[in-house]
Image: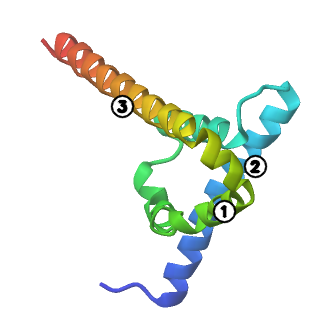
Amino acid sequence: MKTSPTKYLSRLLAELAVLLGLYLLGCQVAAWLAWPIPGGVIGMALLLLAFTLGWVKPAALQMGAGLLMAEMLLFFIPALMSLLDYGALLRDDGWRILLVIAVSTLMVMLVTAFTVELAVRLRRSHEA
């Protein structure tokens, strides 16, 4: 059964509104508490909390999240264009910047791998 374009668009807009609302709520929480954590990170934590508590099913936001993921490159264009203003910085310290990016990416990958491994082991021990 096919959904009508109007129904598809209204669901997509509703999902995007939920994601935007969580982002804005995260920004507001960061401002209220004067935390140095970006609002987007707090919003993602709120989304994870909503998933964990069962308030929202991940499938309920699949279309909106898929659209944002598909168009993610557009969100980085302003940041990439601003690099043109800092050509001298990149020439002088570009290797340091790349080193920090590489090391931090490696650290995130390692922490994620160890966390997943720990979660799988804990789940197996509880199932046994």
Say which residue label 1 marks. 17
Asked whether disc 3 touches disc 1, contact meaning CB atoms under 8 Å apart, the reply is: no
Secondary structure, mark 3, is: helix
Residue 85 percent coordinates (x, y): 75, 59
Q: How many marks?
A: 3
- Residue 104 position within the rendered picture, expressed as x and y whole percent measured from the top left: 48, 30
Say which mark, if any, is on residue 24. 2
Colour convention of the picture? rainbow
Res. 125 image quadrant: top left
Callout 2–callout 1 Cβ contact below 8 Å: no
In percent of the image, x 82 and y 40: which residue is there?
28
Residue underneath mark 3 = 109
Looking at the image, which residue is at 78% across and 25% down? 35
Q: Of marks 3 and 1, which one's residue comes earlier in the chain?
A: 1
Q: In this view, does 6 lie to the left or right of 89?
A: left
Q: Quadrant of residue 119?
A: top left
Q: In this view, does 44 lie above or below 109?
A: below
User: 58 or 72: nearer the eye?
Assistant: 72
Cα distance between the residues tagged 3 and 2: 28 Å
Above or below, comparing residue 59 to residue 127 in the picture: below
Say what amino acid the circle numbered 3 marks: Met
Residue 3 higher or lower than 89, as above or below: below
In this picture, residue 98 sits left or right of residue 76: left
Give the secondary structure at mark 2. Answer: helix
Label 1 sits on a secondary structure element that is helix
Q: In this view, does 55 lie to the left or right of 82?
A: left
Front residue (pair 84, 59): 84
